[in-house]
Amino acid sequence: MIEILTPTDLLRAKDSGALVADILRTLKSRSAVGTNLLEIDAWARSMIMEAGAQSCYVDYEPSFGRGPFGHYICTSVNDAVLHGLPHDYTLADGDLLSLDLAVSLGGVVADSAISFVVGDVQPPESVALIDATERALRAGIAAAGPGARIGDLSHAIGSVLTAAGYSVNTEFGGHGVGSTMHQDPHISNTGRPGRGYRLRPGLLLALEPWVMADTAQLVTDADGWTLRSATGCRTAHSEHTIAITDDGAEVLTQPLP
Ligand code: MG
Ligand code: MG
């Protein structure tokens, strides 16, 4: 199902987006060498509760995961790229951490992910991975607007990732957002321009390019949730929720200055 939001719901979506951005910004600033992933999860929980929002993850039980997720944020470290289940792990210098958060506030969901390197060591390979996903995300957003087709966004995202030398996995990608976290249309991270659903004002989309340094193949961790690169290489993931407006696209999960 594809939801078109009412102007009232779009205003609520802005509040959801601002909350997600604010929580991610805070968690990034607190994530340092010595921080445990379970602390990050606890901080996310308390900020969600304090805001009167609902977690989209804690009871989430999709076909690709094992049982309810049971946590409030995805914490994916190094070779983990998607759905990282928070566990007892202490961050080390040079770890590449991806945080992915979706919450519902006022009945509307916002979904965003950031990747960054923890500590002082900034391995060039990790910096390049993060940069590619951020540039791909910006390209996808630039391609979005009323009248554009999903294939235009997929093509824009995929072109950046491919030009950066990465192969694109098509098992997981972006999606529509609204009263629930995952809705149609699916937005592959590669595709052909001019194809697919035509975007309309009021549509909320989560765009989420992610890459692995030297493979397109995923393996599932023994925890039943965390998806890792098949080769153990480093990975990165960037995501924003955007609203299609009358004259373009507005990023809702942008951190406030
Ligand atoms: Mg997400
Ligand atoms: Mg998403």
Image (cartoon, rainbow, N blue to C red):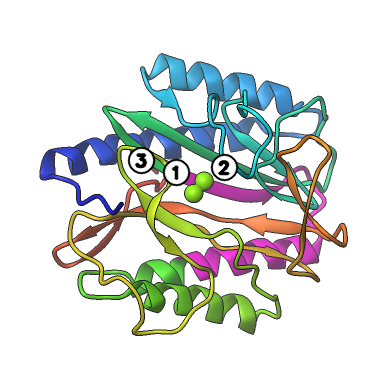
Query: What secondary structure is found at the residue carrying circle 3?
Result: helix
- Whether residue 207 is visible here, answered yes or no, is no
Query: What secondary structure is found at the residue carrying circle 2?
Result: strand
Question: Marks 2 and 3: CB-CB under 8 Å?
Answer: no
Query: In the rendered view, would you say 236 is above or below 247?
Result: above
Query: In the rendered view, would you say 213 is above or below 223?
Result: below
Q: Residue furthest front?
A: 63
- Whether residue 87 is visible here, answered yes or no, is yes
Residue 181 is situated, as x and y percent measured from the top left of the image, at 42, 41
Question: Which numbered disc flags the more N-terminal residue, 3 or 1?
Answer: 3
- Neighbor class of circle 2 (other Cα within 10 Å; few <14, some 14-19, many 20+) is many
Identify the residue under disc 2.
100
- Neighbor class of circle 3 (other Cα within 10 Å; few <14, some 14-19, many 20+) is many
Identify the residue under disc 1.
111
Query: Over which residues does the magenta segment extend?
Result: 111-137
Mark 2 sits near ligand 1, with its Cβ under 8 Å away: yes
Query: What secondary structure is found at the residue carrying circle 1?
Result: strand
At 82% from the left and 51% from the top, the residue drawn is: 121
Q: Is residue 18 left or right of residue 26?
A: left
Front position among marks 3 and 1:
1
The label number, if any, that marks residue 17 in the structure image: 3
Q: Quadrant of residue 32?
A: top right
Q: CA distance from mark 2 to mark 3?
A: 13 Å
